[in-house]
Amino acid sequence: MKSNISLIGFMGSGKSTVGKRLARRLERDFIETDRLIEERAGMPVGDIFQERGETWFRDAEQEVIKGISDSAQNAVIACGGGAVIRQANIEQLKRCSVVVYLETPIPALKERLASSRKRPLLNRPDRDTVIEELHEARRPVYEAAADVTVKTGKRPFAAVISEIIDRLGIDESDRH
C-alpha cells in the first residue's frame, strides 16, 4: 500500500492548510513542495518566477517531487497548483502516494485568492480571467491524476480532512 498522501488542486484550494492539519491528525510528516523549492532557491516562489522564470521553477519542482517520491514515507505532501502540468510529476506522485484532488469551485477560488500577492501567475490586472482560464485548463489534468476527489468550497477544513480519511479508509487507531 502507498504510504503517502499527495494533495493536488488549484492554487487557493487549501492544500497547505488541509495538508498540515491532516498530517497533524494522522501523526505524519508534512511536506510542501513549494517550500522545498524556495529553500533550494533561497527566495520566495514569486521571486523565482521573476528572476529565474517559470521553466526554472518547473524543473526544480520536478526534481523535488522525484526526491520526495524516492524517499518520503508516511507523509502528507502538498503540491504546488501547477505540479500536475508535467506528466513526470504525476507519475512520481502516483508511484509513492494516493493522490487526492481538492476540487474547489471558481467563485471560492476567486474569493480566497482576491488579496493574495504571492501568486506570480495572478499578479496581473485580469486576475479573475487568469483564474478561470488556468482552472479550466488544469481541471481535467487534476481529475485524471486523482485517485480520490474531495470537494472543498466553503466546507470547514475539519470536514474536508475527515472525508479524506474516510475515503482513503485510514484507520486512525493505526496512524502509521
Image: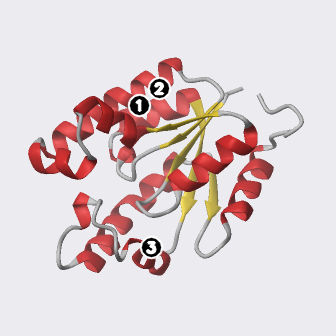
Q: Nearer the viewer, mark 2 or mark 3?
A: 3
User: Quadrant of the image for the C terminus?
Assistant: top right
On the image, the x and y values in percent for residue 21 come to: 65, 50
Does residue 53 lie above or below 94 as drawn? below
121 and 148: which is toward the camera: 121
Of pointers 2 and 3, the one earlier in the residue sequence: 2
The residue that label 3 is drawn on is 112
- Which mark, residue 65? 1
Question: Residue at the spot x=56%, y=58% of the render?
Answer: 102
Does residue 115 lie above or below 97 as drawn? below
Of pointers 3 and 1, the one earlier in the residue sequence: 1
- Which mark, residue 48? none
- Kind of residue at badge 2: Ile
Q: Is residue 55 left or right of residue 4?
A: left
Mark 1 and mark 2 in contact? Answer it, CB < 8 Å.
Answer: yes
The residue that label 2 is drawn on is 68
User: Quadrant of the image for the N terminus?
Assistant: top right
